[in-house]
Amino acid sequence: MFEDLEEDLGDLGPLVKAELVAGINAERYFAQQAAERIEEANSRLAASTVDGLGQHVMSVDLTTYHYWNQKYPGCWQDKNFRAEVMRDNPGTRVRYEPRNGSVRIDGFRQHEEAPA
């Protein structure tokens, strides 16, 4: 790919190639920075369940979300895809700490407050 570009552009070919490579490296760098910020935020915040929405289990940055959705439309609705993303990118996982626990005693449910 780059070889054809260098031939077509003559003396400008190596400069264009260097610019393209620099752009790709910059995108990787910024994606890594975004992933680290999300991982840091996830480590500070405990997830909780929101009535009607379910449990917050992962966070991804917008660029990553759109990249994969464009490559594989509808992929984020696939439970296996989300599990693979969390497996390959552990920083996306949100730890879950239940606020209220429930204990069954003789078929009855009692609620207890989670430790603070």
Image (cartoon, helix red, strand yellow):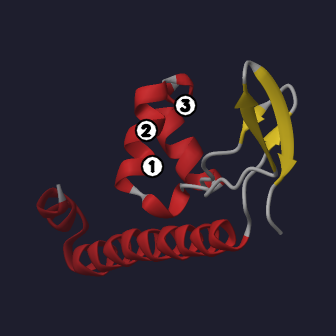
- Image-based side of 68 in relation to 11, left or right: right
Taking 8 as reference, is 40 above or below it? below
x, y (%) of residue 27?
A: 47, 69
Question: CB of mark 1 within 8 Å of CB of mark 3?
Answer: no
Q: Residue at x 15, y 57 (%)?
A: 4
Q: Secondary structure at mark 3?
A: helix
Q: Secondary structure at mark 2?
A: helix
Residue neighbourhood size for the residue with mark 1, other residues' Cα within 10 Å, grouped as few (<14), some (14–19), many (≥20): some
* Residue matched to label 1: 86
Q: Residue at x 51, y 67 (%)?
A: 31
Question: CB of mark 1 within 8 Å of CB of mark 2?
Answer: yes
* Residue matched to label 2: 83
Q: CA distance from mark 3 to mark 2?
A: 10 Å
Amino acid type, mark 2: Ala
Q: Residue at x 42, y 46 (%)?
A: 85
Asked whether 108 or 55 is in front, the reply is: 108
Asked whether 17 or 97 is in front, the reply is: 97
x, y (%) of residue 11?
A: 22, 80
Q: Residue at x 18, y 68 (%)?
A: 6
Amino acid type, mark 3: Trp
Amino acid type, mark 1: Met
- Image-based side of 60 in relation to 99, left or right: left
Give the numbered dot on residue 76: 3
Asked whether 100 or 50 is in front, the reply is: 100
Q: In front of the other: label 1 or label 3?
A: 1
x, y (%) of residue 32?
A: 47, 72
